[in-house]
Amino acid sequence: MTAPSSNMRSLDRAFDVLAVLQDAKQPMRLSEIARHSGLHIATAQRIVNVLLERGYAARTGETYTAGPAALAVAHAFMVTNPLSLLAQTTLQQLAASTGYTASIFVRVENSRVLIGRVESDNPLSYVLPVGERLPLHLGGAGKIILADLPPGEVPAMVPPEEIALASGRTVATAELLAELDTIRREGHAISVSERTYGIASVSAPVRAPGGRLVAVLGVTGPADAFTDTLLPRLITEVRRAAATLGARIPVTG
């Protein structure tokens, strides 16, 4: 009777190690993988060896990275997931109509992951690759996800200390919670120089028929271009695109 529990624990640990490799910004030594995943180094070694055999990890010298099999999983998502397939046309249209980069994010645990992005004729000055995992407490897209959660669950998902923004400003937890109330009420989020200095975004929730939040759609561009005159049009465009995309998502269950 203990085998299923043991098997599930091993599976959880394998995913923990894989998550560490996915989040790493550079190759990691085995000791670092063990520390970040909270595992004994011998346990981490056994798991890494399995991931190496399956192609989910790769080794160079004494360091490890995520392996090419992870790309195959991502490709399968991109070509089979209904949301990913439906979003591409919406992203292209939104980038064309606004003149700014259009992106779509989904929640993965306590973060957001970019699953689609279309550059406009005025591309951003930085590259954010599809698959990038970002925090929920920085940027409008993440805050829309937080705002959709029951208010009692939010404090445990944000840093307990003040949040430092790219602009140099700090935000207390109470201020963040008040902002989430505004997002719930207004149905969109505006972000300026939070994760990247000089970059602004307008985001809106994508809701499937029935109201379930399935993604967040938004446009991103230079902060100085998002003037008080332009913002109302961007909000309207993004909210319209998000509503249209949501209405096309197949009903499940």
Image: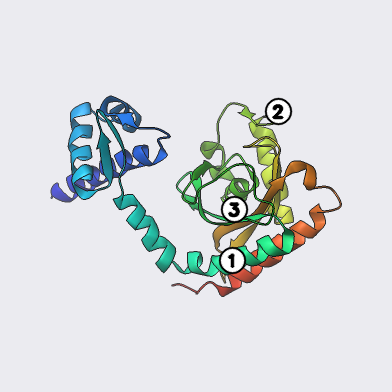
Q: Secondary structure at mark 1?
A: loop
Q: Is residue 154 above or below residue 114?
A: above
Q: Which mark is residue 211?
A: 1
Q: How far, Cα to Cα, is label 1 from label 3?
A: 11 Å
Dot 2 or dot 1, earlier in sequence: 2
How far is mark 2 from mark 3, CA to CA?
Answer: 25 Å
Is 211 drawn above or below residue 163 in the view shown?
Answer: below
Q: Where residue 202 appears, x then y in whole percent?
A: 70, 51
Rendering coords of residue 201 (x, y %): 69, 48
In the rendered structure, the answer to whether residue 93 lies left or right of residue 3 reads right
Kind of residue at disc 1: Gly
Mark 2 sits on what residue? 169
Q: Residue at x 72, y 64 (%)?
A: 97
Number of disc labels:
3
Name the one closer to the observer, 58 or 212: 58
The percent position of residue 157, horizontal first and vertical second, equals 52, 39
Residue 99 lies, with reference to residue 190, above or below; the image says below
- For disc 3, the marked residue is 148
Q: Earlier in the sequence, mark 1 or mark 3?
A: 3
Q: Amino acid at mark 2?
A: Arg
| 227 displayed left or right of 223 | right
| Residue located farthest toward the front when viewing the structure as drawn | 121
Q: Earlier in the sequence, mark 2 or mark 3?
A: 3
Residue 10 on image: x %, y %: 21, 43
Q: Label 1: how many residues lie within 10 Å, few (<14), some (14-19) or many (20+)?
A: few
Q: Amino acid at mark 3?
A: Asp
Q: Tell me which residue sits at (45%, 47%) in the image.
A: 109
Of helix, strand and loop, which one carries label 2? Answer: loop
